[in-house]
Amino acid sequence: MTARLTLFLFSALLAGTAGAAAGDKTDVVRDLAGRVGPIIGSASACRDIARPRIQAIVDKFTAVIMEASSNEAERSDLTQSFDRSVADGRGAVTTGRTDCRSADRQLADLERSIAGPGPGPSVAAVIAPSSAAAATAPTAPVAQVAAGSPVRGVTDQEIRFGMAAPFSGSAKELGRQMKLGIDAAFNRVNETGGVEGRMLKLIAADDGYEPARTADAMRQLYEKDQVFGIIGNVGTPTAVVAVPYALERKMLFFGAFTGANVLRHDPPDRYVFNYRASYAEETDAVVRYLVKLRRIPIRQIAVFAQQDTYGDSGFAGVSKAVRALGVSDAAIVRLNYKRNTVDVDDAVNQLKLQKPPIKAVVMVATYRAAAKFIEKTHDLFPGMLYTNVSFVGSTALADELMLLGPRYASGVIVTQVVPAVSGYSSAVLEYKNALAKYFPGEAADYVSLEGYVAANVLIQGLRRTGPQLDTEKLIDVLENTRDFDLGLGASLNFGRAEHQASHKIWGTALDENGKYQAIELE
């Protein structure tokens, strides 16, 4: 829908709601959220569009939501609708459905309508509260910190960080382990006085690995908990909601547990930093391994993937790797399952139909669904090779498979973005010592190791920034971090055009005892 038509509808809606009941006003604002949000989202995906222009409209629309809402539930519902629409608009640019020239033009049309004057009723009456309400309205959630006031989430005693992750549902072990690793790193630095005398605090919010809950989780962290930044969010479909939320508020979004491209734009989003290698890099490594070392024809490799943006990202990585080998990706079979389920029957049935028979499956799944798929296909396809990207949750996957029996676990491959937890590198030994000290009884785990490493990269940035901490200074420091050695066996680097610290992939395979052993991928 064009901005011009949107503005016409704004005017019509405004004219039709004079004296409307509160419920009708809420419906109007919800409709407007679905029209304004995509314009804001498209603009926010374009680096050449000045952020203050976008923020001004976000601030005004947030105030509209507050005025139109008669209770907290209504306000939350309207805000969530707006955030989803913003995410949709951003996706329109990143997927090529619209371009930045059109986004700039639509934003300019919206700005002119808000400012008025013009024919018909001004949209300013809708995208701004009444003067009386404005005088008593609470501060908009996305308002920037006033000059001279304390930095959000930072006091003389602490720096608060937030994470939105699954702590319930079928992927809850991923959230628990990621938080464990970050807490271990924070505890370790806090024990020696923190950073510039400030203790690091992690506040977690549960989104159940469901995008519909992520906006509420992010809002809780930003508005209620007043966090300085985000670290260790879990998941790709949830990142589709969380990343735009953070960007609109110029809030640091660091070290998420996902290798998806939604966090890896070119050029990179200023406020988004990744520690880990991407899914494209993981799947490229494993496709080359299957083809060149295991001698499996590409036509006999399939992809088992979650039916959402996580699965899409992994499947796209496989397709790119196949094309890089000079082969068409048109015939690659994708076997799907629904997120937060273990309903893999359709995927199994589709696998049975393939001719020639599939010999290897690249899995872009979470641990329970992956284990169920292996259980149902292991005896049907003797000798099948199963590979997984790191997001699967290595320890949880091993535990699930060993419950079925050693034969289900033996030979299952997982690509990793951290070194083997069974190794003796300085980084791994330090992590194990911290885990034993602060969380005795917890076993070493690839997910918690990733959380620990990502947190330590952030801690290094905080230390280099010094006592006068704010987001922009921290980002400038991160963008000038070169050859940082954590003892991983590979140095870490950021830059203005590089917001991913590591590109290293490690190969591991389960043995009959459910333990991961290192394997060479090339």
Image (cartoon, rainbow, N blue to C red):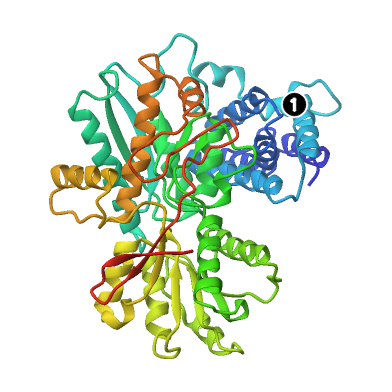
Give x and y (percent) for residue 74: 49, 42
Is residue 233 shown above or below 123?
below
Inspect this view and state whether residue 71 appears. Answer: no
Inspect this view and state whether residue 376 appears. Answer: yes
Give x and y (percent) for residue 328: 71, 71
Judging by the rendered image, the residue that carries numbered circle 1 is 111
Q: As rendered, which of 5 and 48 lies closer to the eye?
A: 48
Q: As rendered, which of 403 and 342 lies closer to the eye?
A: 403
Residue displayed at 45% across by 8% down: 148
Is residue 435 shown above or below 20?
below
Label 1 residue SS: helix
| Displayed quadrant of residue 383 | bottom left
In the image, farthest residue toward the top: 148
Is residue 512 shown above or below 154?
below
Residue displayed at 41% across by 45% down: 233
Give x and y (percent) for residue 481: 47, 29
Residue displayed at 42% across by 78% down: 373
Is residue 310 shown above or below 85?
below
Q: Is residue 512 left or right of residue 29?
A: left
Q: Residues within 10 Å of mark 1 (few under 14, many from 20)?
A: some
Q: Is residue 456 left or right of residue 364?
A: left
Amino acid type at image mark 1 = Glu
Give x and y (percent) for residue 71: 45, 37
Residue displayed at 78% across by 47% down: 1
- Total of numbered circles in the picture? 1
| Displayed quadrant of residue 423 | bottom left
Q: As rendered, which of 521 and 27 lies closer to the eye?
A: 521
